[in-house]
Image (cartoon, coloured by chain):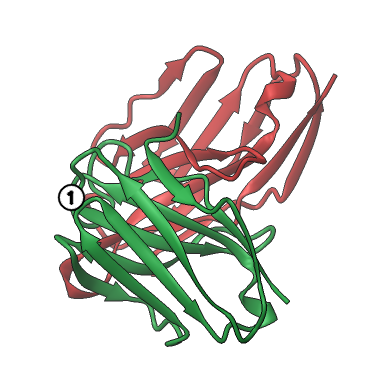
């Protein structure tokens, strides 16, 4: 069982829709991340939250809006996306900020997003 | 520059063959960490190993082994007697400095391994 849970696993949305991706971990990790992974490409960092505060925004367009309501939850709000935003969105967490700990980070199974 | 290169895009082997996945890295840091992750079709990145820059001892875990050589900036991964369940995309990653004093994982392009019965 994965220790980072992401919902939904699959999402199809229109370009005018508003949707949210959710991520949850109960390992007591204080750093959480969003990655975007296009087909046949490596994951690319989007956002980093450390102690519920946004620490890194890798120049992500404003149509992606992250939120960290508490230390266990991480959301990614989506609005007015484009078809090229279709990708696997991975959430991850780590014991400390910046890929800390033995494993670097624990990853969820991701949400496969298709924008039509 | 901080960079990870996995030159092998795809590898195809027959079950029970040994296979080596190459990883070459670039970093200015004197202390750094390297990782290998496995990504099966389900999507989750599964941690395999972490190696510190100051520990060049090779490691073996069952059918998996890793060869870390600082002299050539390489951290190669070998699967002995491959099995169909080993079929996945394998990523090598470097823990690198990001903005604001934080670190992040920089991934190589990945190597897709297909093990055929």
Name the residue: 53% across, 42% down: B44
Name the residue: 31% across, 49% down: A93
User: What is the number of callouts on the image?
Assistant: 1
Q: Is residue A43 visible?
A: yes
Q: Chain of mark 1?
A: A
Estimate the x, y position of residue B8 in percent, counting from the top left: 69, 48
Residue A48 to residue B115: above or below: below
Chain A shade in the render: green
* Secondary structure of residue under mark 1: loop
Q: Quadrant of the C terminus of chain B?
A: top right
In the displayed structure, does residue B4 sit left or right of residue B58? right
Please tell me which residue lies in front, A31 or B55.
A31
Q: Which residue is mark 1?
A: A96
Q: Is residue B73 visible?
A: no
- Chain that is red in the image: B
Residue B39 to residue B84: above or below: below
In the displayed structure, does residue B41 sit left or right of residue B54? right
Q: Quadrant of the N terminus of chain B?
A: bottom left
Estimate the x, y position of residue B54 in percent, counting from the top left: 23, 38
Please tell me which residue lies in front, B102 or B22.
B102
Estimate the x, y position of residue A91 in percent, counting from the top left: 42, 55
**Quadrant hosting residue B99:** bottom left
Estimate the x, y position of residue A12 in percent, counting from the top left: 67, 66
Q: Residues within 10 Å of mark 1 (few under 14, many from 20)?
A: some
Residue A63 to residue B7: above or below: below
Please tell me which residue lies in front, B37 or A32.
A32
């Amino acid at each position: 069982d994965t220790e980072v849970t992401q919902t939904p696993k699959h999402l199809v949305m229109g370009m005018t829709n508003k949707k949210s991706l959710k991520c949850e971990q109960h390992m007591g990790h204080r750093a959480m991340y969003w990655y975007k992974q296009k087909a046949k490409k490596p994951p690319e960092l989007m956002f980093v939250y450390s102690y519920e505060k946004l620490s890194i925004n890798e120049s992500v367009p404003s149509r992606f809006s992250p939120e960290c309501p508490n230390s266990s939850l991480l959301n990614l709000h989506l609005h007015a996306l484009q078809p090229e935003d279709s990708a696997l969105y991975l959430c991850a967490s780590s014991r400390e900020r910046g890929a800390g700990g033995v494993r670097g980070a624990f990853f969820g199974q991701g949400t496969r997003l298709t924008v039509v | 520059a901080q960079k990870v290169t996995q030159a092998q895009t795809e590898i195809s082997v027959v079950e029970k063959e040994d296979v080596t996945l190459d990883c070459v890295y670039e970093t200015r840091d004197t202390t750094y960490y390297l990782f290998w992750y496995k990504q099966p079709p389900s999507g989750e990145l599964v941690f395999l190993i972490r190696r510190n820059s100051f520990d060049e001892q090779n490691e073996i875990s069952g059918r998996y082994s890793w060869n870390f050589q600082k002299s050539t900036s390489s951290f190669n991964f070998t699967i002995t007697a491959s099995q169909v369940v080993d079929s996945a995309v394998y990523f090598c990653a470097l823990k690198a400095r990001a903005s604001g004093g934080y670190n992040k994982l920089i991934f190589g392009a990945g190597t897709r391994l297909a093990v055929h019965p």
